[in-house]
Image (spheres, rainbow, N blue to C red):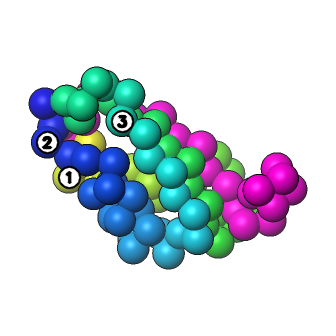
Amino acid sequence: MSGYTEEHLKQKLTEKLEATHVEVTDESDGCGGKFSAVIVSSQFQGKPLLQRHRLVNAALAEELKTIHAFSQKTYTPEQWAAEGH
């Protein structure tokens, strides 16, 4: 049990990555052990997927010590808009 909430992760990602859109879903039935996230940030511009994920993992370094599973989808604002959002 990580003790982290969707809201905590959303706030931290928004702040650290200057994200314009963040969705965090707790997929662990409330124990905080498994999360998925959608993150939209201009900091991802020109970066390949691995570098984007490293930015996210660095932003959540402390939290990921106790979260067992974390899946993420990262988009630039332009990519997010092109997806129809």
Q: Is residue 15 left or right of residue 46?
A: left
Q: CA distance from mark 3 to mark 1?
A: 17 Å
* Location of residue 28 with respect to 66 vertically, above or below: above
Residue furthest front in the image: 29
Residue at figure coordinates x 43%, y 39% from the top left: 25
User: Which quarter of the rendered picture does the N terminus lie within?
Assistant: top left
Tell me the residue that label 2 is attached to: 3
Q: In the rendering, at what x and y percent does residue 50 appear?
A: 58, 45
Determine which of the numbered discs, if any, sits on residue 39 in the image. Answer: none
Q: Residues within 10 Å of mark 2 (few under 14, many from 20)?
A: few
Residue 45 percent across, percent down from the top left: 70, 67
Answer above or below: position of 37 versus 67.
Answer: below
Task: Kindly state the secondary structure of the residue where label 2 is placed.
Answer: loop
What numbered label is drawn on residue 62?
A: 1
Name which residue type carries label 3.
Asp
The residue stretch that appears in magenta: 65-85
- To which quarter of the image does residue 10 belong? bottom left
Which residue shows up at 64% across the image and 46% down it? Answer: 49
Residue at x 44% of width, y 54% of height: 56
Residue with the mark numbered 3? 26
Residue 43 location, quadrant: bottom right
Can you say which quadrant of the picture contains the C terminus? bottom right
Query: What is the spatial separation of the Cα atoms under label 3 and label 2, in whole angstroms?
Result: 11 Å
Give the Cα separation between the discs numbered 1 and 2.
Answer: 12 Å
Rate crowding at label 3 as few (under 14), some (14 to 19) or many (20 or more) other CA atoms within 10 Å. some
Q: Is residue 67 magenta?
A: yes
Tag 1–tag 2 contact (CB < 8 Å): no
